Image (cartoon, rainbow, N blue to C red):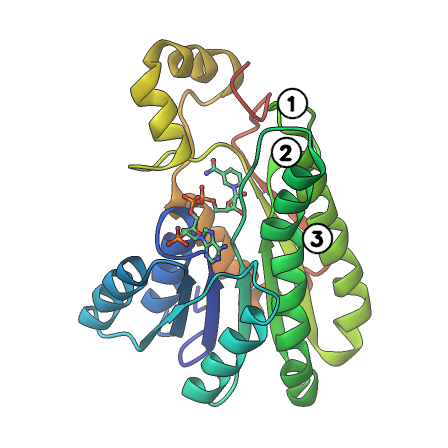
Amino acid sequence: MDLGLTGKAVLVTGASRGIGAAIATGFAAEGCRVAVVARGEEGVTELTGQLQASGAEALPLVADLTEPDAAERVVRAAEEAFGQLDILVNNLGGGTTGDTDEAWLQTLDVNLLAAVRCCRAAIPGMKERRAGAILIVASISGWMVGGGMPSYNVAKAAEIMYARTLGRDLAPFGIRANTISPGSIMFPDGGWDRVQQRDPERIANFVERDMPRGSFGTPEEIADVAVFLCSDRASLITGADIHVDGCQLKPAVG
Ligand SMILES: NC(=O)c1ccc[n+]([C@@H]2O[C@H](COP(=O)([O-])OP(=O)(O)OC[C@H]3O[C@@H](n4cnc5c(N)ncnc54)[C@H](OP(=O)(O)O)[C@@H]3O)[C@@H](O)[C@H]2O)c1
């Protein structure tokens, strides 16, 4: 299938490793121009260096997207470098334990608000061109109870509803917005890999009890779906939450 993505300008947040890096790499492989955002300069320059070495146009952007003006800054930088922004992938996110106001606000900020700010900055340009695709990486934790981090469940549920409202409101402008809900994804130095190093038996039990296919997902399995969803081949999919979880039964190890 030709996804028709060649030359599209893409911004991926939280993209120096894990799922975000795989999504950025997936778009680059389809001939897109890709801006990669994270806080650590080393991570973004390493990834964009790899993408450039593979022949892609890639832009490293260093920003902490929990800072209120950072989203506007990175979206403008991508628009300036590429002339426009066709696709925005809000991958940034993560959980916090604790039940304090501070923990809740931090979780909502890094997941929901960072995405809202990036969308707010990117939508006017997309509206002008009457075309665009927005994707937010949510989680099965957004619709399945468990994991011991209620603020994370709530933040991911809010992302799903936010994308649904964007899907409805932006459809008349030719812009689509969706979420993808990954199950548990394993990659070197990622969150699950760290649990595996500490307690391999706990991870083995989790896989046996709660992952019907008998293994974690990979970042590439999320990236393939993400790239398709942002292509015109998915033109009728908007306001949707796509589960990419291998029918996982619980969102986290119990
Ligand atoms: N891994 C899973 O099992 C899983 C399952 C379901 C959903 N998800 C969701 O998938 C997304 C990616 O997860 P992941 O596990 O791949 O993440 P990860 O390993 O924690 O990577 C996070 C990325 O975001 C960057 N980052 C962190 N804080 C940032 C900030 N304030 N501003 C800008 N960049 C920041 C990190 O680089 P720096 O540290 O250099 O900033 C890194 O590139 C998240 O939304 C997560 O909730 C993950």
- In 3D space, how far apart are the residues under numbered discs 2 and 3 (Cα atoms)? 16 Å
**Residues at circles 2 and 1 in contact by the CB criterion of under 8 Å:** yes
Disc 2 designates what residue? Answer: 141
Disc 3 designates what residue? Answer: 240
Tag 1 or tag 2, which sits nearer the N-term?
A: 2
Amino acid bearing label 2: Ser
Q: Which residue is at 68% across, 45% downward?
A: 105
- In 3D space, how far apart are the residues under numbered discs 2 and 1 (Cα atoms)? 7 Å
Q: Quadrant of the N terminus?
A: bottom left
> Dot 2 surroundings within 10 Å: few (below 14), some, or many (20 or more)?
many
Task: Report whether 248 appears left or right of 53.
Answer: right
**Against 247, is 126 above or below?**
below
Q: Please tell me in which quadrant of the rendered image residue 237 appears.
A: bottom right
**Image location of residue 113, percent across then percent down:** 66, 57
Disc 1 designates what residue? Answer: 146
Tag 3 or tag 2, which sits nearer the N-term?
A: 2
Is residue 52 or residue 115 the one in the foreground? Answer: 115
Q: Quadrant of the C terminus?
A: top right
**Image location of residue 246, percent across then percent down:** 52, 31
Task: Report whether 61 appears left or right of 110.
Answer: left
Q: Is residue 235 visible?
A: no
> Dot 3 surroundings within 10 Å: few (below 14), some, or many (20 or more)?
many
**Against 226, is 59 above or below?**
below
